[in-house]
Image (spheres, helix red, strand yellow):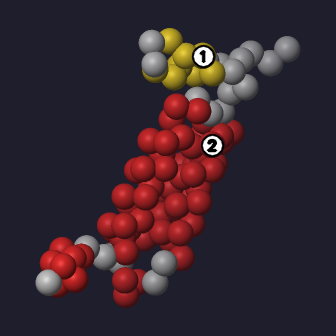
Amino acid sequence: MLLQLVDSFLLDYHVGHVLLLLLVVTTLGAIPLGSQKVIAANLMTFGLIFTVSPFGIMTQLYILLGIALIVIAPLLWTTATEWAGRQGGIVWFRWIEPR
């Protein structure tokens, strides 16, 4: 009976939903670290996973999301700063001028 309940709940979801949930959870877990590079690495990893996943187990929207993440993540990595300050629980990033 419990197995049928779990099975009926899981039939409405596919791998794309699970990967999207994992992306959100890991990104929310990386935000308190205050590092743009960690977030960029997270987005790049999930972009690659979304892109190489087979078409049969996900819709095309998730493949396009993977391509978008692969484009955005390196931009976030290159604009990452060396310093991240925390004010009131919010992470604020600032640019460091080259010397």
Query: Of the residues under marks 2 and 1, which one precedes in the sequence?
Result: 2
In the rendered image, residue 67, in percent from the top left (x then y), is placed at 50, 63
* Residue 50 to residue 27: above or below: below
Give the amino acid at mark 1: Gly
In the rendered image, residue 4, in percent from the top left (x then y), is placed at 17, 84
Question: In the rendered image, which residue does mark 2 sit on?
Answer: 38
> Quadrant where the C terminus lies?
top right
Quarter of the image where one finds residue 64: bottom left
Question: In the rendered image, which residue does mark 1 sit on?
Answer: 85
Q: Is residue 27 found left or right of 16 in the rendered image?
A: right
Extreme residue toward the bottom, this view: 56
Q: Residue at x 65, y 40 (%)?
A: 37
Asked if disc 2 and disc 1 are in contact, CB closer than 8 Å, the reply is no
* Residue 67 to residue 75: above or below: below
Q: Separation of disc 2 and disc 1 at Cα?
A: 15 Å
> Quadrant where the N terminus lies?
bottom left
Q: Residue at x 45, y 12 (%)?
A: 88
